[in-house]
Image (spheres, grey):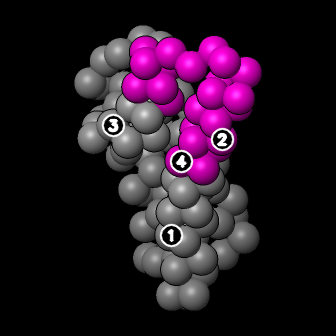
């Protein structure tokens, strides 16, 4: 089980890194591969482990997305406080955490 959990966390991490790369090198292929890696990484603990490990893994991925949204909102607030608010930067921060693919 420990090896499966380690593999699933590596797959999820690789998927998140690929999503980050997709922001700079926009390609539908990179996004699809990233999402497949994340889905496989979440599914492995359910399939090879017990349900509680799978649920914790799934909640961790959801918490990471919520944290990214919180950090993007905080970054926009810091821009507003510094007087550097730009519609383009605000839209970019919103797009990064809410884009559909």
Magenta run includes residue 50 = no
The CA distance from mark 2 to mark 4 is: 9 Å
Question: Is label 3 or label 2 in front?
Answer: 2
Q: Are marks 3 and 1 in contact (CB under 8 Å)?
A: no
Give me the C-alpha separation between circle 4 and circle 3: 11 Å
Marks 4, 3: nearer the viewer: 4
Element under disc 1: helix
Measured in 3D between alpha carbons, the distance from the residue under mark 3 to the one under mark 1, in whole angstroms, is 20 Å
User: Measured from the top left, where is residue 92 in percent x and y?
Assistant: 44, 23
Q: Which residue is mark 2?
A: 74
Location of mark 1 (residue): 58
Identify the residue position indicated by label 3 in the image.
Answer: 99
Disc 2 residue crowd, few under 14, some 14–19, many 20+, Cα 10 Å = few
Q: Residues within 10 Å of mark 3 (few under 14, many from 20)?
A: few
Q: Which residue is mark 4?
A: 69
> Could you say where residue 82 lies in the image, as x and y percent from the top left?
73, 21
Visible residue check, residue 68: no
Instruction: Report the residue at 43% width, 18% height from top.
Output: 87
Q: Secondary structure at mark 3?
A: loop
Q: CA distance from mark 3 to mark 2?
A: 18 Å
Work out whether residue 10 can be spotted: yes
Residue stretch in magenta:
69-93
Q: Measuring 69% from the left and 59% from the top, which residue is drawn there? A: 6
Closer to the camera: disc 2 or disc 4? Answer: 2
Q: Is residue 95 left or right of residue 81?
A: left
Lower sequence index among marks 2 and 1: 1
């Amino acid at each position: 089980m420990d090896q499966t959990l380690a593999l699933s966390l590596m797959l999820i991490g690789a998927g998140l890194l690929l999503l980050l790369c997709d922001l700079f090198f926009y390609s539908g292929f990179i996004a699809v591969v990233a999402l497949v890696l994340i889905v496989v990484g979440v599914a492995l603990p359910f399939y090879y482990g017990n349900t509680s490990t799978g649920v914790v893994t799934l909640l961790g991925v959801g918490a990471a997305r919520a944290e990214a949204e919180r950090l993007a909102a905080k970054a926009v607030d810091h821009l507003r406080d510094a007087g550097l608010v730009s519609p383009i930067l605000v839209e970019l921060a919103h797009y990064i955490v809410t884009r559909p693919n």
